[in-house]
Image (cartoon, rainbow, N blue to C red):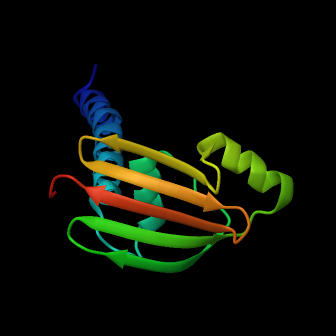
Amino acid sequence: MTKETRKSLLIMLVCVVTVPVLLFKGCTSLGKTIYTSMDCDRFNIDHIEMRTGIDIQQIQRNYCRLSSDEREVSFKSLKDGASEMAYAQRYFTWDGTTFSATGSNPETNWYASLDTISNELYFRLNYITSE
């Protein structure tokens, strides 16, 4: 094996190892940025999805209020008919007046509701620890 061949193999090996590691680190860093994002514009929907596990699609934002320990967001759901009911049944339970869901994790307590009459999709996230 010549010196040039060894050099080429070493460069290829470094690239094969380095590129996936950098890609993984970048994706992990982006996920952490979204999860800790305290902004009503950038990553707002992704942040809520990561904290609650509820997929949010086909919406128009009504309002967003943000404080150091709470986020309150309301969306107008653009789903209708059977697709809205399938969505509601997948993520929410019927509580007599609206569809609602609650949950928590070590950093967040959250409440979500879907009013199928007004098509309002509402989220309230209470942050337990400051990040």
- Quick check: 117 left or right of 44? right
Residue furthest out toward the top: 1
Q: Position of residue 24 (x, y in %)?
A: 33, 41
Figure quadrant of the C terminus: bottom left
Asked whether residue 26 appears in the rendered view, the answer is no
- Which residue does the image show at 66% across and 41% down from the upper left? 90
Pick whichever, 131 or 86, lies toward us: 86
Residue furthest out toward the front: 96
Position of 38 relative to 129 (above/below): below
- Which residue does the image show at 29% across and 66% down from the upper left? 70
Pick whichever, 119 or 97, lies toward us: 97
Q: Position of residue 116 (x, y in %)?
A: 72, 62
Q: Position of residue 62 (x, y in %)?
A: 55, 80
- Quick check: 86 left or right of 127? right
Figure quadrant of the N terminus: top left
Position of 47 relative to 39 (above/below): above
- Which residue does the image show at 39% across and 50% down from the upper left? 51
Position of 90 relative to 10 (above/below): below
Position of 125 relative to 92 (above/below): below
